[in-house]
Amino acid sequence: MSSSIIKLAIADDHKIFRKGVILSMRSYTNMKFVMEADNGQELIDKIPEAMPDVILCDLKMPVKDGIDTTKIITRDYPNIRVIILTMFEDERFVGHLMDCGAAGYLLKNTDPSEIKRAIMDVVRTGFYLNPFVNKVLIKKNYSKQKFNPNLSSEVVLSDKEKEVLTLVCMEFTASEIAAKMNISPRTVEATKDRLMERFGVKNSVGLVFYAMKNQLID
């Protein structure tokens, strides 16, 4: 990143938002957008041609989401900095993306001046920490619980997972569920643990709220 002009790229499936960010940054003469993409795969395909210094990347995109895209870019292009620019204001996403190699995490309502500051910081130091990210890192929530985000709107459950989840929502205990399903309580607890990890929740209450919110049970 030795060039005096910082080369930027943006990946977001909402064209109006993409163009708005590009337009809002136009007054900063030491930066130039050299590339834009509708999704993560298109971004990855275009990188060898444009070789941006910093990428502004959305999380929820078709074809390839921002999580997988960040992992690939930071692995294959370690000198390129990825700043997440998203609507997801979830502390667990921050920690997970930082673990994946993201250099910064910004919300889409961020002022252009802060986006500029984030870009300058990641070029200079390799990362950008704003108060939102600082709070997550201080609390270290992401290090206490494994979180594998799923950005897909479709959640597919096995028959056993759905039955366990349904009975949990009906307030049956693990022993009662085991008796009804003719399985061991240990199997019930293992299934619950697996669902909690998938959904990013901490307990049975979280499972119930997630199931209701996403209409996972009949």
Image: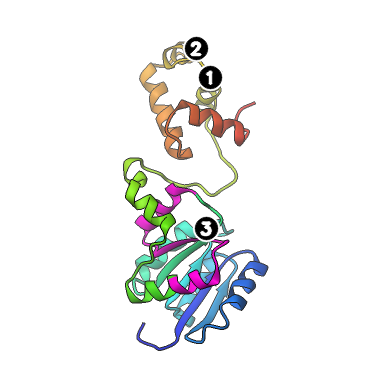
The type of colouring in the image is: rainbow
Q: Is residue 106 magenta?
A: yes
Q: Amino acid at mark 3?
A: Leu
Q: Amino acid at mark 1?
A: Leu
Residue 168, horizontal then vertical, whole percent: 51, 21
Which residue is labeled 2 in the image? 180
Residue ID at (45%, 36%)? 201
Q: Residues within 10 Å of mark 3 (few under 14, many from 20)?
A: many
Query: Against 27, is 146 above or below?
Result: above
Q: Nearer the viewer, residue 118 or 97?
A: 118
Q: Is label 3 in contact with label 2 (beta carbons under 8 Å)?
A: no
Q: Mark 2 or 1 closer to N-term? A: 1
Q: Are marks 1 and 3 in contact (CB under 8 Å)?
A: no
Secondary structure beneath dot 2 equals helix
Q: Disc 3 marks which residue?
A: 59
Q: Secondary structure at mark 3?
A: loop
Q: At 41% across and 76% down in the image, what residue appears?
A: 120
- Note whether 128 is above or below 54 in the view shown: above
